[in-house]
């Protein structure tokens, strides 16, 4: 029974990490992870679409930027060089385009979820 509870607990954490409220921070030491914006979608780990409402951020890659770090699930620092980044992203225009391109990097968001 205890194992079943643990499985359900971790499964629920995985389900709720899809809502992605993000805050941009000024210093790398404040961030959960660093990101680099690539020039082409084919180069990214995650295609990101900025959404206007928190309720729209319901799957990976749909990021709702909050005003205060206390509201964020993830605090990100944008780096100048790709080699400095934990995750590479490309901003897309439509929600349907958002999502993982390199699923091997999914652990970055999972381990940093608040």
Image (tube, rainbow, N blue to C red):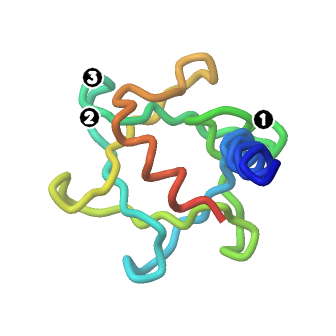
Name the residue at the top extreme: 96
Q: Write the residue at 78% across / 35% down.
A: 56
Q: Is residue 75 placed above or below 19 in the rendered structure?
A: below
Label 2 or label 1, whichever lies nearer to me, is 1
Label 3: few (<14), some (14–19) or many (≥20) C-alpha neighbours in 10 Å: few
Which structural element holds mark 2? loop
Q: Which residue is mark 1?
A: 56
In the picture, measured across the screen, residue 98 lies left or right of residue 36, that is: right
Residue 37 position in % (x across, y down): 33, 46
Q: Is residue 46 placed above or below 109 in the rendered structure?
A: above
Question: Reading the chain from its start, which is encountered first: label 2 or label 1?
Answer: 2
Q: Write the residue at 66% across / 32% down.
A: 59
In the picture, measured across the screen, residue 75 lies left or right of residue 35, that is: right
Q: Quadrant of the C terminus?
A: bottom right
Q: Label 3 to label 2, Cα distance in Å? A: 9 Å
Name the residue at the front extreme: 1
Label 1: few (<14), some (14–19) or many (≥20) C-alpha neighbours in 10 Å: some
**Which of 2 and 41 lies nearest the eye of the viewer?**
2
Q: Label 2 to label 1, Cα distance in Å? A: 25 Å
Q: Is residue 24 placed above or below 69 in the rendered structure?
A: above
Q: Which mark is residue 39?
A: 2
Q: Write the residue at 51% across / 36% down.
A: 48
Q: Quadrant of residue 27?
A: bottom left
Q: Which residue is mark 3?
A: 42
Which structural element holds mark 1? helix
Q: Write the residue at 33% across / 25% down.
A: 41
Residue 45 position in % (x across, y down): 34, 35
Q: Quadrant of residue 7?
A: top right
């Amino acid at each position: 029974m205890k194992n079943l509870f643990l499985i359900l607990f971790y499964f629920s954490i995985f389900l709720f990490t899809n809502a992605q409220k993000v805050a941009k921070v000024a210093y790398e030491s404040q961030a959960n992870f660093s990101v680099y914006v690539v020039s082409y979608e084919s180069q990214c780990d995650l295609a990101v679409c900025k959404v206007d409402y928190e309720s729209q951020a319901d799957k990976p890659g749909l990021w709702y930027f909050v005003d205060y770090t206390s509201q964020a699930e993830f605090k990100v620092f944008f780096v100048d060089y790709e080699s400095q980044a934990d995750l590479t992203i490309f901003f897309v225009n439509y929600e349907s385009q958002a999502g993982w391109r390199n699923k091997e990097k999914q652990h970055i968001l999972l381990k940093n979820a608040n």
